[in-house]
Image (cartoon, rainbow, N blue to C red):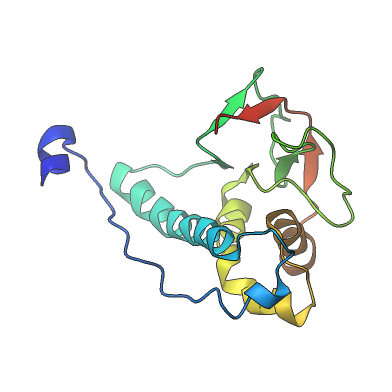
Amino acid sequence: QIISRMLRPKFAAFLDKPAFSAEAYIPHTKPGTNCWGMMCQHYSWNLAAQQIPICEELYGYHYDAIMRLRLDANFHHEISLPTSLDTIYVPAVEGHMKKPFNPAQMCNDQIAIGPRTLMLQFLRLLQHYPNFIRDKLLLTPESVVHHYLRHIMRCDFRTFPLAYNLQR
């Protein structure tokens, strides 16, 4: 009620605790990876994918492109992409690692930009965790995103240069 009175939103979503269990996936996670945190992040992506069409209908327009990013990302320059987004683009370097990934195994999990249809599919990554186990994937945020894009969505994602860091 306080939010409604102060902000007068047209749409508000209140999230319940996720109804999944990370315990089954912990044995498949790379040591040092927070499996619960990774799955909560993907749960929030899934919620965003559900809310985007609701907001589009509410406000009467559809997005051409969608950008998924961490809110603590601090960009060092403008984002420069092709004018026609035909696939999903991810930065070549992770903000906190300062080194490129092996593109055959991993990709940036912190930022992704792409056309609406591909991004709505991308944001629904959480429901594919059983496939990651079936495919014997060692779970890290970067390997999960790469495997999902390349092998489940069969998306020929591309990288682009983006200098940024995380304000943790």
Considering the image in quadrants, where does the C terminus appear? top right
- How many numbered discs, if any? 0
Pick the residue in front: 134 or 31.
31
Q: Residue at x 65, y 28 (%)?
A: 165
- Is residue 14 toward the left or the right of residue 40 in the image? left
User: Vertically, is 128 above or below 46?
Assistant: below
Pick the residue in front: 11 or 42.
42
Q: Percent from the top left, x then y, of residue 20?
A: 47, 75
User: Looking at this rendering, what residue extends furthest in the front direction?
Assistant: 32
Q: Quadrant of residue 139?
A: bottom right
Q: Residue at x 18, y 34 (%)?
A: 7
User: Vertically, is 116 above or below 39?
Assistant: above
Q: Residue at x 36, y 66 (%)?
A: 17
Q: Percent from the top left, x then y, of residue 46?
A: 49, 61
Q: Quadrant of residue 141?
A: bottom right
User: Vertically, is 156 above or below 159?
Assistant: below
Q: Percent from the top left, x then y, of residue 142?
A: 73, 53
Pick the residue in front: 133 or 4.
133
- Is residue 37 toward the left or the right of residue 9 in the image? right
